[in-house]
Image: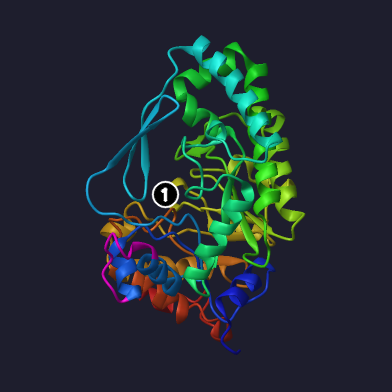
Amino acid sequence: MNQMTKRERVEAVLNHQEPDRVAVYDIIHNIPIMEHFAGEKITNDNAFDVSLRGVGRALDLTRCIAIPFTGERVHSASQGFEYSFDWWTFTVTKRPYKNVQHLAECVRREIDGIYDAMAHNRLTADAALVAQLTASDAQSPEEVHDTFARICKALGDCVLIHPESIVGLTTAYVRAGWDLFIYLMGDEPELVDQWLEALCAYEVKRIHGMADRELSPIALVADDLAGKQGLFFSPKWLRKHWFPLLRRCIDAWHSHGIKVMFHSDGDKMAILDDLVAVGIDAINPIEPTVGMSIGAIRRRYPDLVVTSMIDCDQLLPFGTPEEVEIACKQAIDDGARGGSFLLGSSSELHPEAKLENFLKMLEVAQGYGRYANKDHWGAPSWRG
């Protein structure tokens, strides 16, 4: 089999075909890994070019680009929120809501603000997970598209997933904080439904303004619904209040010929049938520490692309390259036959992940993961 381009490899995976080798999908939030592949040290002056060059050379597919900066954590405030930012993550340190009644008043105003922004085709912090506008200084979905195109160009032939679509539930509970959000669900369930409806409608409009299959064949639709112990919300509640919203986001991306990867951390098995039924094309991640089985999922859903299964909590930061090799080969044995498989970490290559462990992951993908030489799949010889 001739060597594919990265775009061809990703397209093959999404179309349930066997590429030339296992494709690697990940998020790189790790300066040593970026610098290794870029061949240059990152500074505040060159961070955009060097970090994207490193990511683009390392991976077949990526998302959630973050540009490194050095120095102190950055603190910012907007709309009564306060945040603490590292270059690759953030923490909400203060919210403006005094109590559940005040939250309800603010949510009503925010709903009006969302619909006003939609009417004027502009982005709004009222619908943002973080009260900053997505994609730098973009003011409209079309400007998000233009920023996305610029990043795609800087990545080279690495495929970039479209700017992620949050259905709305995560946005709501992060903005409110868990305690007040749960009280609001109990005290004013109709207001919660109206809030989620507004957030979803805003996201669908944003999708139609930035979708571009020429730039990328895949989008990520997300809401964090679960932890290591299972779902945060009951399947019954999700089926009534949330799944119809998810379907609208998926249908919007599909209308542009773009496949959808669904993301939620944690154990999602209780609703995996529902996720497949509403049309997701890929599931992310398959966390080994919560008991999700790649092999069982592939057997049950042969047309579902499985992704992101190499443990980044313990294995990639603290394990050895030999242990990473075993985990990657096992994942390939369990899920790669026939295609529809993306090898990668269970969340991201965060700052504590070891460079040598990521290099071992790539080595396995490029050697053991070659589809032209797949007699080894399922054979135990590599386990010693």
Front position in the image: 290 or 193: 193
Q: Residue 338's spot in the image, x, y percent?
A: 64, 73
Q: Quadrant of the C terminus?
A: bottom left
Front position in the image: 56 or 169: 56
Q: Which residues are magenta?
A: 39-48
How many numbered marks does the figure carry?
Answer: 1
Q: How is the image coloured?
A: rainbow
Query: How dense is the environment of label 1, judged by Cα within 10 Å: few (below 14), some, or many (20 and up)?
Result: some
Q: Magenta stretch containing residue 75, yes or no?
A: no
Q: Residue furthest right?
A: 255
Q: Is residue 273 above or below residue 371?
A: above
Q: Residue 29's spot in the image, x, y percent?
A: 36, 57
Query: What residue does disc 1 label?
Result: 289
Q: Residue 219's spot in the image, x, y percent?
A: 62, 56
Amino acid identity at mark 1: Thr
Q: Quadrant of residue 66?
A: bottom left
Q: Is residue 230 above or below residue 283?
A: above
Q: Is residue 67 above or below residue 111?
A: below
Residue at 67% from the left image edge and 61% from the top image edge: 212
Residue at 67% from the left image edge and 23% from the top image edge: 194
Front position in the image: 155 or 272: 155
Residue at 38% from the left image edge and 57% from the top image edge: 67
Majority secondary structure in the magenta region: loop
**Res 71 visible:** yes
From the viewer's perspective, tell me whether residue 200 is left or right of residue 5. Answer: right
Residue at 44% from the left image edge and 55% from the top image edge: 346
From the viewer's perspective, tell me whether residue 212 is left or right of residue 49. Answer: right
Q: Residue 227's spot in the image, x, y percent?
A: 46, 38
Q: Quadrant of residue 256?
A: bottom right
